Amino acid sequence: MAWGGALSAARLLSGLVRIKVVALALGVSGVGIFSLLLQMNLTGVAIVSMSLAVPIINLGRPSVAEGRFAAAGAIAGTALAMVVANALVLIFAAAWFGTDLFRAAGIGQLDPLLVWPLVFSIVIAAFGTSIGEGMSYLSDRFDAYVWVGIVAAVADMLATATAAWLYGLRGAIIAMPVSSVVLVGAYALLVGRDRTARQVLRNFSVSLSRLPSLLTYSAMMFATIALTNIGLTFTRAKLLVEAGAQANGYLQTATAISAYILAFVTTGFWGHLHARAAAAGDSPEIRAELGQALRLGALISFTGCGTAVVLARYLIPLFYSGQFSGAEELVIAYMPGELCYQLLFLLTAYQLTISRRRRYFAWSVGYVLLLTAVGYLAIPRFGALGYVGAHVSAAVLMLCATAAICWRSHQIRASFLSLAVVLVGLLALLSAGSFYLLGHPEAEAWRLIGLVPMGVTAAIAGRELLGGARARVRLDS
């Protein structure tokens, strides 16, 4: 969890600089268009990579633990061949239909040639997020994954901020492939020198017999992530068309801040549980680890979301600029739903680590379908607030359903459910109080009282992290 926190902190700091410069250079409307392109980039990476990192880890990790490197190499090598084939399909599709892509997304004013930096970014990143990430977890080198993420985040900050400042939106788009190139290069340098990874690499092969097992995972992950990104892209594009680029830019303020908080919660969770749960399964020991990780994740999530609610007026100019002050009410309304979504994400992610694929698919897609359906109805009437309402309602409903199923399956305890209810209720009260303060500036000093619960949860989470780090040191000694 500490390694995950380090990566998230680096991404937060570098992202803060990048967002600040991009916001100043592009303005609200420019950020609205650029955020849609970033969402398209995420969708493309999900499609090309087919999330093959997950089957590489879940299928290959037991083989590596048993020293069967030929089997692990066949899994990883076949996955590499699949990514190459998908990349070629994307390149040919862009050559034929690329000029219509921006027009279909409602940004037809962009130069059609700018589709190629987007395509190259997708293709290169797909290799990093599938083969590179898979190999790092396969070798149990979460530390390498963290360092690669830090280097890529810094490169993205430098390239995007510089290009946006000098050349505006066009420069920001052209700079998109830089972080992808750095990501792949860093994986090659760090993971490629690992002894376990080299043994797997020496046994790389393409085996048609491995396709069914790979496709079983990949089809599920591909469908889950592709549907998620398609749903989000469709909903954001509808907001862009119905309410304009400025509304989309305001919404990006809320979603970007929440994304940084989510990274603090989930990165360490994956690094701590995925490799060991893939090998051990849903055992009592793994469930005990899950309980501790869920408790810590809930405390960190509440601390981040609550701080964003109470200090939204000050965080928005810090992250963006004064032009984005209109996003304050969106941030305040968004965060209670974000806390529910992050708890939902942790419960859903655990199902993937123990290969409960149907649950993972149903819960992930269920959230996005609810978001898309409610957003489709609410956005034309309420604009960006309609999207926020869709996010909150989808997150709350899906969290209630998944928590009930996990509790009945004895994966979580009643103590965690009680903690979640208390934290969500408290954050809802903080959100309501912050809305009240929007219309009563004379009571602004009362915001300081709202920071007290976050200070308490941050102290508890810090103590648990420090205690876990000391225990690991003693164990290693």
Image (tube, rainbow, N blue to C red):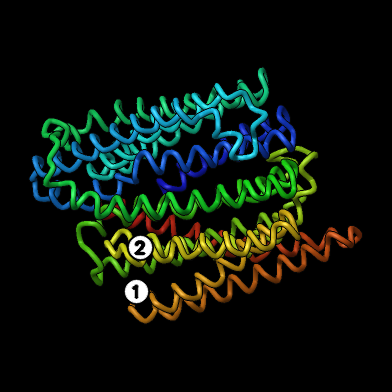
Q: Within 10 angstroms of label 1, few (less than 14), some, or many (20 or more) residues?
A: many
Question: Residue 344 location, x and y as percent?
Answer: 47, 65
Answer whether labels 1 and 2 touch (C-beta < 8 Å): yes
Q: Nearer the viewer, residue 106 or 363?
A: 106
Please, what secondary structure does the residue beneath circle 1 have? loop
The reply to whether residue 436 is in sight is: yes
**Point 41% across, 25% down: residue:** 181
**Point 78% across, 60% down: residue:** 447
Q: Residue furthest top?
A: 166
The amino acid type, in three-letter code, at marker 2 is Tyr
Residue 374: name its quadrant. bottom right
Query: Where is mark 1, residue-wise?
Result: 411
**Residue 114, placed above or below residue 438:** above
Residue 459: name its quadrant. bottom right
**Residue 402, placed above or below residue 245:** below
Q: Nearer the viewer, residue 18 or 238?
A: 238
Mark 1–mark 2 distance (CA, rounded to whole Å)? 9 Å
Question: Residue 391 location, x and y as percent?
Answer: 60, 61
